[in-house]
Image: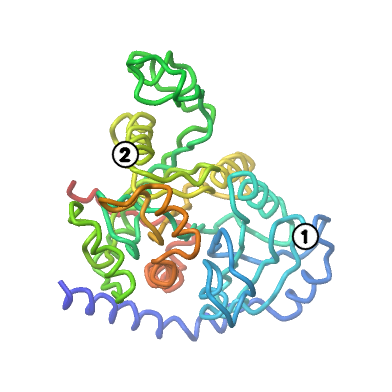
Amino acid sequence: MMARTLTGMAALAAALLASSAAAQDTAVPAADIAAVLACEPGEACETSLPVKIVIVSLFEIGEDEGDVAGEFQLWRERRGLDVRIPFPQGFHDLYYNPETQVLGMVTGIGTARSSASGMALGLDQRFDLAQAYWLVAGIAGIDPEDASIGSVAWARYLVDGDLAHEIDPREIPDDWKYGYFARHTRGPNDRETPVDASGGEMFELNRGLEEWGYALTKDVALPDGDAIAEERSQFVNHPNARKPPFVLEGDQLAAMTFWHGSMMNDWANEWVDYWTEGKGEFMTSAMEETGFITSLTNLDRTGLVDADRVMVIRAGSNFTMPPEGVDAASYLLAENEGYAGLEAAVENLYTVGSMVVDALLADWDRYADTIPSAAPLPQ
């Protein structure tokens, strides 16, 4: 497996070297950069910058370079995102590479901020996003039943965890497992009412593009470390949690509440199973995806963006429940002091995400008009 991985990476590296001269020839002229920087944000702009890929980070820690890395910093430092473009209508200024035409953004935490930032960028006349690919790359809680911290999961479904009915668990009927249940239903035990996700409860990403990205990256060797090895060793009854980091497929649950614990983890698995009608599997918990995809879905109707070009990867920075023998409150409060897998997660996000970025750029003449797709992988 490792030999095949290295061979594939060598071929990709050769393609990148072959395309580097072409990238220089297609670099955005300095005059166009100056013209865009002279435009007032939110107003008409006669010049627009072409964007091939948008790197979508959700938060950063401290500065954008030179300190502890959050989700954005490695992209900023390693991908030559050196042109800073004011973005007051969003959460965080944008960064652009005129040679590769890669744009980096930070949406801010939560579905509200991510939705607002996505819509603001899509409507910004300083950018041509019609052919842009969107790579949402963020850290997440990860289900120890499925994977270890540091692992990177490719999402197929994005499920919202906020749009719901709720009754305090102390007041629910005796036969209800949860006080939280889907709208349009008569309670958490109702499986007769047809699933209706028209309110934005669930989105399915372009499966062909997701499978292409997963196939490209699934065999990459992700680095291990003493800190994450020690953390995962506590999960004695979860064999997948004890593995070194790896790449896998698994779906994303976005909710504004930072939830934690084995009971909530059971709810998350059942919630994703319900909304995907058994086709998806809960893997990672975060806060932004359904807000962001809502904005892009709406923008897609205008032709400003192509929502079929959205990819989502999440890397586990922490587990969604504690190990055996540890109570949920203690474990959550300890994680709030610093995620055990933060450094591994942001590094592995960059490793996996960069393989996709490099592949798109290396064959842009093809992928500008044709979205890559892979044959369905064995289940």
Nearer to us in this view, 175 or 54: 175
Where disc 2 sits, the SS reads loop
Nearer to us in this view, 111 or 370: 111
Q: Image height check: is 300 above or below 278?
A: below
Q: Residue at x 48, y 60 (%)?
A: 138
Residue beneath disc 2: 280
In this rendering, would 313 be left or right of 325? right
The amino acid marked with disc number 1 is Pro
The circle drawn on residue 88 is: 1
Q: Residue at x 39, y 66 (%)?
A: 341
Q: Image height check: is 209 above or below 70?
A: above
Q: What distance separates the C-alpha of mark 1 from that of mark 2?
A: 37 Å
Q: Residue at x 48, y 65 (%)?
A: 338
Q: Earlier in the sequence, mark 1 or mark 2?
A: 1
In this rendering, would 123 be left or right of 170? right
Percent of width and height locating residue 261? 37, 44
Using a 10 Å C-alpha cutoff, classify the residue at mark 1 as few (fewer than 14 neighbours), some (14 to 19) or many (20 or more): few
The answer to whether one can see residue 350 in this image is: yes
Q: How is the image coloured?
A: rainbow
Percent of width and height locating residue 277? 32, 29
Percent of width and height locating residue 239? 17, 56
Percent of width and height locating residue 190? 36, 16
The amino acid marked with disc number 2 is Gly
Q: Residue at x 51, y 27 (%)?
A: 164
Figure quadrant of the N terminus: bottom left
